[in-house]
Image: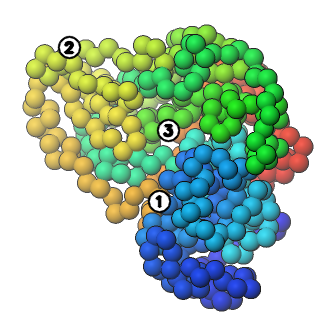
Amino acid sequence: MQNTPRRDFLKKSSAATFGFTLLPSYLATGRSAEGKQPPSKRVNLGCVGVGGRASGVIPSVSANGAATPVAFTDVDFSARRVDANLKRYPSVKQFADFRVMLEKMGKDIDAVTVVTPDHTHFPAAMLAMSMGKHVYVEKPLTHSYREADLLMKAERKFGVITQMGNQGHTSGGSVQFAQLLKTGALDGINKIDAWKSPGLFFMDKNRRISAFPKAEEQPKSLNWDLWCGPAKMKPFSKLYHPFDWRAFYLYGNGMLGDWGAHIIDFAHDFLKLGQPTQISPLLMEDHNNVIFPLSSHIKMQFPARSKKLPAVELTWRDGGGYHPKVAEQYHAGGKAPRLGGAGTLLHRADGKYALTRGSHSGSSNIVSADPKYREQYAEALKPNGPKFNHGASFTAACKGEDKTLSPFSIAGDLTKTLMLGIVCQSLNEELNFDRKREQFINNDRANDLLEGPAPRKGWEEFYKMV
């Protein structure tokens, strides 16, 4: 396929560019299930992944008729929650292979959503970007450090609008965090505790496995070869599709990749953490080479970025013992703050107070035995919502009406940190990282994992586009 410039679809003539012999009624009239907008003011979506998480992403991006799907791609149109979008958009053309979708309907597509298992994010996003399409990709952005780096380069090269699906990054919680930073409430953060309670099958000790599952009869509706994409194709098992693939190093990124993008995203972006220089395993319970640990505790060391942004020690805990201990100086009225099942606790070097935050769009709170600090930052603690939510922000940015807050320049950098933690989980050993060279120091095995496995034959081209 030839690289094509991004189209200015606000100026195009729908009759000249849609390419349909007969337009579906919702395109010809501007009517959609989500609202009314004339074709010249709508973003036409090609959707890679229709079920699962896409049952929420596609309507979010299409809200109020600002965008409308014109093509669906899925390897299994009978999988979980696919029917929601099929009923919502019954006239949309269906494909099994995103490559075929983009070849046949590329001229009709302005933007692409990619909501698939982690190991297939990269090729779909890269091909769409190379064709000048804006892309919205679910979190984590990629399945390897190298893939994240390539998508960041592609964003710069192709000049398209991008957004990763960590929805809280466009929320009142993120606006509040920026306000706290501006007022100095976040000055001197030198320690961060981050955690997530167990919730996936591999975090149940009674369901643990240490070898790849045996072959099972696959659904007739499933194209297993396309599901595996660039990754090694194992015999089909229900432990992979439609949901539990996240447990396997081969296809997913575990709890850190799944929830880390929702939990440490504010701190990583606003505090300009970049990549750690050291990653240390504190606990890797029931470690093996097939699925992620039963419980995983990791410590990351980040260097100082400025006087107000000193060196940071970040500890991630998932599974058992996930809550950090909260020092008594942060107990209001003699009671420790409630931490919940997912969140962060940010410590200041002066120890005057700490800040807690949950996940996604969760707001932050100052915790201290002395109430004066909450009073001091009362105005900054008031959350003010952004103009658009995360999905609508992407669509508005495609039309030049807004900018995305988790573009690949930000989301890719966060994803790289998550991938470094996952390399530590995989090897269960302390790692030293050279931020400038973006390589582990004296550890070839770890550097191989940064690269990720070589793509299967026929999928190599996507890694050569930038």
Determine whether 94 is above or below 171 in the image.
below
- Mark 2 vs mark 1: give the one in front: 1
Whichever of labels 1 and 3 marks the residue nearer the N terminus, that label is 1
Between 70 and 428, the one lying in front of the other is 70
Give the residue at mark 2. 328
Give the residue at mark 3. 261
Q: Position of residue 236 (x, y in %)?
A: 78, 33
Between 29 and 314, the one lying in front of the other is 29
Q: Residue at x 65, y 64 (%)?
A: 46
Between 147 and 291, the one lying in front of the other is 291
SS at badge 2: helix
Whichever of labels 2 and 1 marks the residue nearer the N terminus, that label is 1
The colour scheme is: rainbow
Q: Which mark is residue 166?
A: none
Give the residue at mark 1. 60
Q: How far, Cα to Cα, is label 1 from label 3? A: 19 Å
Q: Residue at x 25, y 40 (%)?
A: 184
Left/right of residue 62 with respect to residue 377 in the rendered view = right
SS at badge 3: helix
Determine whether 89 is above or below 209 in the image.
below
- Quarter holding the C terminus is bottom right
Q: Are marks 2 and 1 in contact (CB under 8 Å)?
A: no
Determine whether 164 is above or below 31 in the image.
above
Can I make out residue 287 in this image? yes
Number of numbered discs visible in the structure rendering: 3
Q: Amino acid at mark 3?
A: Ala
Classed neighbour count for the residue bearing mark 2: other residues with Cα under 10 Å, few (<14), some (14–19), many (≥20): few
Determine whether 107 is above or below 329 in the image.
below
